[in-house]
Image: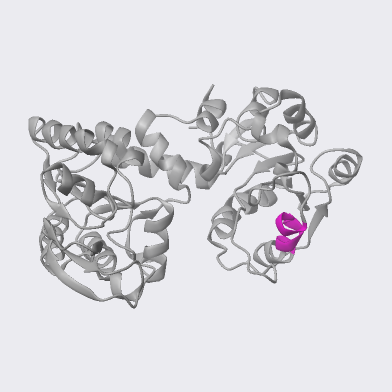
Amino acid sequence: MKTVDNYNFKGKKALVRVDFNVPLDAQYNITDDTRIRAAIPTLNKIIADGGSVILMSHLGRPKDGPDEKYSLKHIVNHISKLLNRPVLFAADCIGADAKSIAKELKAGEVLLLENLRFYKQETAGTESFAHELASLGDVYVNDAFGTAHRAHASTTIIAKFFPNDKVFGYVMANELASINKVLNKSQKPFTAIMGGAKVSGKILIIDNLLDKIDNLIIGGGMAYTFIKAQGGKVGSSLVEEDKLDIALKILKDAKAKGVNIYIPVDTIAASAFSNDAVKQTVDIKKIPDGFMGLDIGPESEKIFAEVIMKSKTILWNGPMGVFEMSNFENGTRSISDDIAAATKLGAYSLIGGGDSVAAINKYNLADDVSYVSTGGGALLEYIESGNLPGVKAIEE
């Protein structure tokens, strides 16, 4: 794997694709700077070598060109603080202004370009746009794992203009190493925990994992599709009616491959999708009419804990319930605690997917698991397909 460690940036302008798509509040304050902090070691390596840095990123999903709400100028001061040096800002990512600032960059200086997605050519993967970006630097560094599953101009197409000068940053290298460790070098027993709302988004992932895992724990909204497929009564719980056959096929395939599947046995059912709803703990196969399951129940927590505590490799994607509501967060909190405890006993744990990461951070357990992935969609696509456009572009 070609990383920044294999490259000397002395006298070079490094064009670095980062994922600084961070959440901002109404006053444009950053509410979670995890993604920015993750990229700092890569930038420090370039600067320490005697190189300069040109940062490229997107922010949000602007629809029609420049939009104040999505301007990267709002994060300049925060990057400056983390790097302990001033960061220059170009009010466009291409054009005369960006070119002239980039041209004058001296060793140790850092320039942030304006939001790439102010141009539709970025997401379209337009080669001429990628070429304009490429003209700003001498070497291309991809450190944006969160967008590596997109064949965008700045994540994939641009790499062809740097045939001998393209490398992974530390975020990308660490993400790939952690996924490969889980998928290809896992210690047994290997347990995958899949939650979240829908089965549909996880079918290919589960299919791919069945040949590698020993245990599959299913929770969250997707559990009710499995329960209904087996003839259970799920009240008004979330169910994908058109995926009942697929749920049964997953159960059948898992059995054929010797994979143990664990589905909740009880649930916290609510009279409405509200934290203040009337709630009761019931058998998950017998949810009363007018009630919906919003979390796993205490018996399920115990069963899942037992499986997790015996595991040597753990992959977690998706919460067990509506953990944003305090009355329906116990299942997700319990899983988080169990994974942290198993990690302490020597298990390797990889947490991926926005909601799972949000949960681990909510319960302050990020330092108690082995690796927290910065890119949910990219992680899942890598598990599905075994590669990503942004990864292939560097490795070719």
- In the rendering, at what x and y percent does residue 264 appear? 15, 56
- In the picture, measured across the screen, residue 31 lies left or right of residue 125, that is left
Which percent across, then down, holds residue 167? Answer: 58, 34
- Against 385, is 315 above or below? below
168 versus 77 height, above or below = above
- The residue positioned 64% from the left and 48% from the top of the image is 61
Quadrant location of residue 327? Answer: bottom left
- Residue 235 or residue 1, whichever sits in front: 235
Q: In terms of secondary structure, what is the magenta stretch mainly?
A: helix
Q: Quadrant of residue 211?
A: top left
Q: Is residue 13 left or right of residue 239?
A: right
Taking 272 as reference, is 169 above or below it? above
Residue 74 located within the stretch drawn in magenta: yes
Whether residue 256 sits left or right of residue 184 in the image: it is left
Residue 198 showing in the rendered view: yes
Is 93 positioned to the left or the right of 250 in the image? right
Residue 366 seen by the camera: no
* Quadrant housing residue 74: bottom right
The residue shown at (44%, 47%) is 376
Q: Is residue 234 magenta?
A: no
The magenta region covers 68-76
